């Protein structure tokens, strides 16, 4: 085996050993233990550059969706590239600040913005609130008035477009909790235009995650542009149009649109209107920039199944258990033999749903090091301490160098802030 089953930037085999850029993943595992997340700087910079180049001279802003991976090191790499940031909490806002991001390039999404979060965002002069309900709009008006500030807003409209993705990550249907029904958006924009401490600057739309076809993007964009045209006739204009994120990546055999195809579609729908285009990619920028290293603890044979029990679990990588998501699992060292079987790769957590992959054909020995691919998005950021398991470390590779950017939690860290009854 000399190639990976899916195309990745930043990770490749060299003489049968999997490398992260110029660094041996075996060496990283020896130094930092397993399980362990490893990210490639080059694999983050490449898709950002592709999107940026695809826009050409068109005014645009790429706002990274922080929820995909909120590591300070990841945010810092993107801040250095000039990215904006799409946040959904005050905690994410503070992470952006501490990573060197510019609050003036931040857009605040999410259905449940609390009052203190809105105040903090106004204090830091963020670029825009993506408003998701009328009560939220009214709350922003009240808080901005009390602070004697003007809040820049867009409405996140829900165009009722089927993103043709997993129902848990679909956000653009009328039964989803997100956004404002596009049928009522016109009247709500007219209402916002009368508010003393609100400035309308844009319109926003996000229909879901891991989209692999262009048609849902086009359908949603066309419905948004129809709304823009109607509002412009009423004198309500926009500085930007935010088409959200959702562009997918290959996990297995998906063939998502390229950056060029995606941007071309948006440009065709927007046409020659003098507005800045904003997008909010998350998974597309970091999903294939990370792997999870894990060690084989036991090979357990039963009458009906062959279980490969590893030291990573659902608390380290939730996606397979939560979404039945597929992640390729490959050996880090392909130069040795082993027992070739079809394995269920499972973790030590006491749940039947604790698995990283099922029915995987692998040649294995106890003690082997495996890499779970495409783990850069919704990996560590969704990790928990379930079963009182410390979360794994995070390591960055950059050329021939590696750096520990988050140490492994220790068991004592898990209850350091707790107390017993006196």
Image (tube, helix red, strand yellow):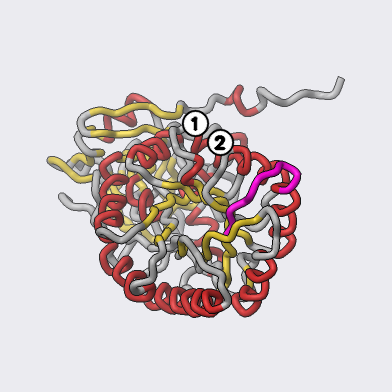
- Which mark is drawn over residue 275? none
- Based on the picture, tell me whether residue 209 belongs to the magenta stretch: no
The residue range painted magenta reads: 145-153
**Which mark is on residue 98?**
1
Label pair 2/1, CB-CB below 8 angstroms? yes
Indicate whether 401 appears above or below 18. above
Instruction: Measure the C-alpha gap from mark 2 to mark 1.
Output: 6 Å
Q: Is residue 161 left or right of residue 182?
A: left
Q: Give the quadrant of the C terminus.
A: top right
Q: Position of residue 267 (x, y in %)?
A: 33, 70
| Quarter of the figure with residue 38 | top left
The kind of secondary structure element at disc 1 is helix
Can residue 85 be seen here? The reply is yes
Dot 2 lies on which element? helix
Q: Which label belongs to residue 94?
A: 2
Q: Residue 369: which quarter of the image?
A: top left
Task: Classify 370 as above or below 258.
Answer: above
């Amino acid at each position: 085996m000399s190639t990976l089953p899916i195309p990745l930037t930043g990770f490749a085999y060299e003489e049968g050993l999997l490398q992260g850029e110029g660094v041996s993943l075996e060496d990283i595992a020896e130094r930092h233990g397993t399980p362990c997340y490893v990210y490639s700087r080059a694999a983050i910079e490449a898709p950002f550059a592709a999107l940026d180049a695809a826009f050409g001279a068109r005014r645009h802003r790429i706002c990274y969706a922080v929820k995909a991976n909120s590591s300070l090191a990841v945010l810092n790499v993107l801040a250095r590239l000039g990215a904006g940031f799409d946040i959904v909490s005050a905690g994410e806002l503070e992470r952006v600040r501490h990573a060197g991001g510019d609050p003036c390039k931040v857009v605040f999404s999410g259905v449940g913005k609390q009052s203190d979060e809105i105040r903090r965002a106004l204090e830091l002069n963020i670029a825009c609130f993506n408003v998701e309900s009328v009560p939220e709009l009214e709350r922003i008006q009240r808080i901005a008035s009390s602070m004697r500030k003007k809040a820049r807003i867009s409405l996140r409209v829900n165009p009722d477009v089927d993103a043709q993705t997993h129902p848990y990550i679909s956000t653009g249907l009328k039964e989803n909790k997100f956004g404002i029904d596009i049928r009522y958006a016109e009247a709500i924009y007219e209402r916002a235009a009368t508010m003393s401490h609100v400035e309308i600057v844009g319109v926003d739309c996000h229909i879901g995650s891991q989209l692999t076809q262009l048609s849902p993007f086009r359908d949603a964009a066309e419905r948004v542009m129809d709304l823009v045209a109607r509002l412009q006739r009423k004198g309500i204009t926009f500085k930007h149009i935010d088409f959200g994120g959702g562009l997918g990546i290959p996990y297995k055999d998906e063939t998502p649109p390229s950056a060029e195809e995606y941007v071309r579609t948006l440009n065709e729908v927007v046409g020659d209107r003098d507005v800045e285009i904003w997008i909010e990619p998350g998974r597309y920028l970091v999903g294939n920039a990370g792997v999870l290293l894990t060690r084989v603890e036991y090979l357990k044979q039963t009458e009906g199944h062959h279980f490969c029990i590893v030291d990573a679990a659902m608390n380290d990588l939730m996606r397979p258990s939560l979404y039945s998501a597929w992640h390729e699992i490959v050996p880090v060292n392909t130069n040795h033999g082993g027992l070739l079987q079809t394995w269920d790769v499972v973790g030590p957590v006491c749940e039947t749903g604790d698995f990283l992959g099922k029915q995987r054909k692998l040649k294995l020995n106890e003690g082997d090091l495996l890499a779970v691919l495409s783990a850069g998005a919704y990996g560590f950021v969704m990790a928990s301490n379930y079963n009182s398991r410390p979360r794994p470390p995070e390591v960055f590779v950059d050329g021939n160098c590696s750096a520990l950017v988050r140490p492994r939690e220790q068991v004592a860290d898990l209850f350091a802030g707790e107390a017993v009854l006196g």
